[in-house]
Amino acid sequence: MCQAIDKRISVIKGDITKLEVDAIVNAANSSLLGGGGVDGAIHKAGGREILEECIKIRNKQGGCAIGEAVITNAGYLKAKFVIHTVGPVWNEGTKGEVELLDRCYKNSFQLAHEHNVKSIAYPCISTGIYRFPKDIAAKVAVNKIISLLLEHTSIEKVIFVCFDDANYLEYKKYI
Ligand code: AR6
């Protein structure tokens, strides 16, 4: 990795709801109404205000498609925004999952850029309940974020937040 990018990308092990960054990304589902995993943790810690904005978006556009992203307030969280994206369910790689996961990173980043976000934290989208292989997912995430950081210099910092050792070790191969 070149030195300029090196300083703008990092990986930590921890709970994304605790981070003090401009935006955190949520691995949501198409309903935008919450669920388990990181989605459940974000809604629980962030409170009702996030869900209320998700409901408004849902009423307006009928949820969020796989690979797309929407942005809301961050309720009680320290972040300013939550960017909700919907990862693909792993289906042995037969349903364009890699391309869809790539789009999650891209569309979340794009929304962050449009909202003048300087720092953004991503969870390991799709690698929990949606069963995406962690090695492939880490490679997709890191490659995409490096190319987006090169393209958009306004976003200063991207943090990958891993909740488990297996994901953390995958990211450490690259960062
Ligand atoms: N901070 C950071 N990462 C976390 C946290 C946390 N607090 N909690 C879990 N993770 P998952 P998916 C990690 O299952 O696979 C929900 O029900 C977790 O270890 O949250 O995209 C949604 O509503 C894993 O590495 O999301 C959808 O229905 C990663 O976050 C569905 O799950 C993603 O795991 C989405 O499944």
Image (spheres, rainbow, N blue to C red):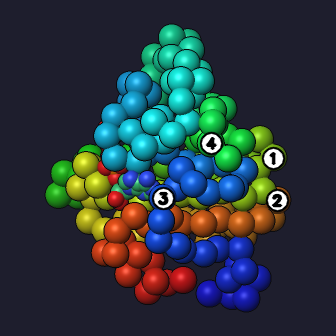
Circle nearer the N terminus (4, 3): 3
Three-letter amino acid code of the residue under disc 4: Leu
Ligand 1 within 8 Å of disc 1? The answer is no
Ligand 1 within 8 Å of disc 4? The answer is no
* Residue on which disc 3 sits: 15
Q: CA distance from mark 2 to mark 4?
A: 23 Å
* Residue on which disc 4 sits: 77
Circle nearer the N terminus (3, 2): 3
Circle nearer the N terminus (2, 4): 4
* Residue on which disc 2 sits: 154
Q: CA distance from mark 1 to mark 3?
A: 24 Å
Three-letter amino acid code of the residue under disc 1: Asn
Ligand 1 within 8 Å of disc 2? The answer is no
Judged from the image, the secondary structure of the residue bearing numbered disc 2 is loop
Judged from the image, the secondary structure of the residue bearing numbered disc 1 is loop
Circle nearer the N terminus (4, 1): 4
Q: Say if mark 4 contacts mark 1, CB within 8 Å.
A: no
Circle nearer the N terminus (1, 3): 3
Circle nearer the N terminus (2, 1): 1
Relative vertical location of residue 152 with respect to residue 170 in this rendering, above or below: above
Expressed as whole percent of the image width and height from the top left, the position of residue 102 reads 47, 56
Q: Residue at x 55, y 18 (%)?
A: 52
Three-letter amino acid code of the residue under disc 3: Asp
Q: Residue at x 60, y 66 (%)?
A: 159
Q: Say if mark 2 contacts mark 1, CB within 8 Å.
A: yes
172 left or right of 107 in image: left
Label 3: few (<14), some or many (≥20) within 10 Å? some
